[in-house]
Image (spheres, helix red, strand yellow):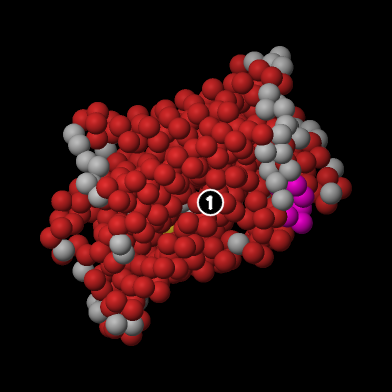
Amino acid sequence: MNWTALIIFILLFGFITVLGFVAANWRRGDLDQLHEWGLAGRRLGTVVIWFLLGGDVYTAYTFIAVPALVFGAGAIGFFALPYTIIVYPLVFLILPRMWAVAHKHNYITAADFVEGRHGNRWLALAVAITGIMATMPYIALQLLGIEVVIGAMGVQAAGFLGDLPLIIAFVILAAFTYTSGLRAPAMIAVVKDTLIYITVIAMVVVIPIEIGGYTKLFASVPEAKLLLTSPKNGNLGQYSAYATLALGSAFALFLYPHTMTAIFSSSGREVIRRNAAYLPAYSFLLGLLALTGFMALAVSVDKLPEFAPQFARYGSNFAVPALILHSFPDWFAGVAFAAIAIGGLVPAAIMSIAASNLFTRNIYVPFIRPDRTPKQEAQNAKIVSLIVKFGALIFIIFLPLQYAIQLQLLGGIWISQTIPAVIVSLYTAWLNPWALLIGWAVGIVTGTWMAASQGFQSAVVPLSLDGLTIPGYAALYALGLNFAVSIVLTLALNPFRATRGTDQTAAADYHM
């Protein structure tokens, strides 16, 4: 047991717990209103949104999984860097329109907008279910980062005692989310991101000095992991896989309910535009974080005997914790591990709120309780957020971790299939809602089948065209088919007025 690291970890964790409950009184509003509880009253400014989106996108799983991918697979793991660069011009151009129309019509979810735009609650239901299904395994995977760092401090036991730290962490998460809503992760994100920046900067300065400089670091990395595999024998190999993963992930990132929730909570369009300019600072941080995978390779942490039990249990996911323990004093390891664990709580809180908003607004209200009061709507969202977190906890404790990873892989494919209904609809209502629904279904089935063809081990599938094999991201291939079906069926259905709903929005609504 590493008592020094554990004590520092507990102190920092206790601090953010207090902060989570105090947040209920920050910019106080009526938390019996869903927009106050689930969107912090739509009053969050530039600085808070910068931290909130940073905490939302760059999670504990990111901190563990990106270096682990670089450590295990090499350069392909750096696809996360260009996709977070590509995404911000899209955010700058597209999402201020979403904020404006949502603010005008009091939309709380992307599915609210889809129903308002197309007047079709079944299409909105499809978007809502997709968002919930894509978010649930993401919440479970935040537990992975927490579990790994708890194990790194020597807190390991069998059965209930082994799971107790995770249970305590998520009880705390559930309590302050229920009490404070989105204000809690917004306030905690400031602490989390500060700790993450301190940890990563220390790692990229101290560890290379210990190794003997960046020249020696890169020289010690096998060439097969340092570079992408070159195309050969009519196969584009990792080149096309890298490019399509980056592009497809960029398209999908801000469709996830938790990132959309942060956008809706902004106080204005300019807050979103400014953050599109400022958030690439996190992309720089992500690049540094990915480099730690190479550092772990250079140090050969997986061959150090003191870490053999943890690598046997967690695999390459233990690369960063092992690197921290090997390179820093115990007190700093406690700070770093607290940063990773808090980095799991912040996005998990936002994700559970986002999922509960979707269930409440797009399933509970239209199909179960259309006569609800605003207070009942908010109360239902709070209860559902507890159920979502409890479900994620049960998932990670009782089911193999591989299931959560496979579902998260599918989640990226699934959420991409909402692009025609959500993003394209911000610019035109021409696409027929029933055509969009059928296109969505075709994309979901095709993308899932593609992932199944790889044994759910990879989202990259080979596409053969005239003797050329193009390995690419299944989400993009499925999305292409989704668009094709939506366009063809729109041409067939639009002449029949009964197939179209009423658009509640006006052109001016998108430019408030």
Placement of 22 over or under 49, stated as above or below: above
Taking the image as drawn, is residue 171 in sight?
A: yes
Report x, y in % for residue 262.
63, 46
Label 1: how many Cα within 10 Å (few below 14, some 14–19, many 20+): many
Examine the image and state in which quarter residue 237 appears. bottom left
Q: Residue furthest bottom?
A: 215
Q: Residue furthest left?
A: 305
At a point 76% along the width and 56% down the height, the residue shown is 270
- Chain part drawn in magenta: 266-271
Report x, y in % for residue 429.
75, 44
Q: Nearer the viewer, residue 183 or 241?
A: 183
At a point 40% along the width and 72% down the height, the residue shown is 204
Placement of 370 over or under 150, stated as above or below: above
From the viewer's perspective, tell me whether residue 484 is left or right of residue 153: right
Residue under pointer 1: 191
Element type where label 1 sits in the image: helix
Report x, y in % for residue 301.
22, 65
From the viewer's perspective, tell me whether residue 434 is left or right of residue 188: right
Taking the image as drawn, is residue 365 in sight?
A: no
Placement of 423 over or under 24, stated as above or below: below
Q: Is residue 23 magenta?
A: no
Report x, y in % for residue 394.
35, 29
Amino acid marked by disc 1: Val
